Amino acid sequence: MQSQRFAAGVDTVGSVTLANLLARTQFDGAVVACGNARGMDLAASVAPFILRGVTLLGVEAVRPRLASRREAWVRLARDLDKEALSRMSETIRFSEALERAKKIVEGRVRGRIVVAIG
């Protein structure tokens, strides 16, 4: 277990990154796992689940139902704080994507990275 830092989180990397996010999630927090860029393994303890009541939710994004997908886009458009998203976002050139991906896998990137194509 690590010190509590996050009320919730979304992990697209998996492996060690997901294990660390779980270990730093606060009491009654929730973590959504929706990717495995770093790997499918999860070297984690059950401690966050039984000592802090952390919930791990898996998102299956390969074949989501069309109605669910539409509702998600409607809710994002309505509820997402666009200013907060802008503050945590960075746009990079396509030529920078591979180097940035390496940093993501190493756990050295925070926020949202947008890759500009062309």
Image (spheres, rainbow, N blue to C red):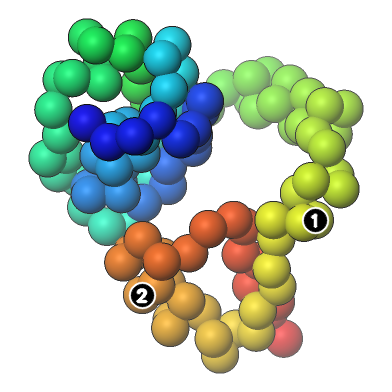
Q: Residue at x 27, y 36 (%)?
A: 2
Q: Nearer the viewer, residue 34 or 15?
A: 15
The crowding category of the residue bearing disc 2, from other C-alpha atoms within 10 Å (few below 14, some 14 to 19, many at least 20), is: few
Taking 104 as reference, is 47 left or right? Answer: left
Viewport quadrant of the C terminus: bottom right
Residue 38: % across, % down: 27, 57
Amino acid type, mark 1: Ser
Q: Which residue is mark 1?
A: 86
Where residue 12 appears, x then y in whole percent?
42, 47
Q: Amino acid at mark 2?
A: Lys
Residue 105: x percent and y percent?
33, 64
Residue furthest front as drawn = 3
Looking at this view, name the residue that lies furthest to the bottom.
Answer: 95
Residue at which label 2 appears = 102
Q: CA distance from mark 1 to mark 2?
A: 23 Å
Q: Residue 85, how many percent across, how many down?
A: 76, 49
Secondary element at image label 1: helix
Name the image quarter holding residue 24: top left
The residue lying at 43 percent from left, 23 percent from top is 26
Residue at x-position 26% and y-position 21%? 48
Mark 1 crowdedness (10 Å alpha carbons): few <14, some 14-19, many ≥20: few
Instruction: Decide which of tag 1 and tag 2 comes sooner along the chain.
Output: 1
Where disc 2 sits, the SS reads helix
Figure check: 2 above or below 49: below
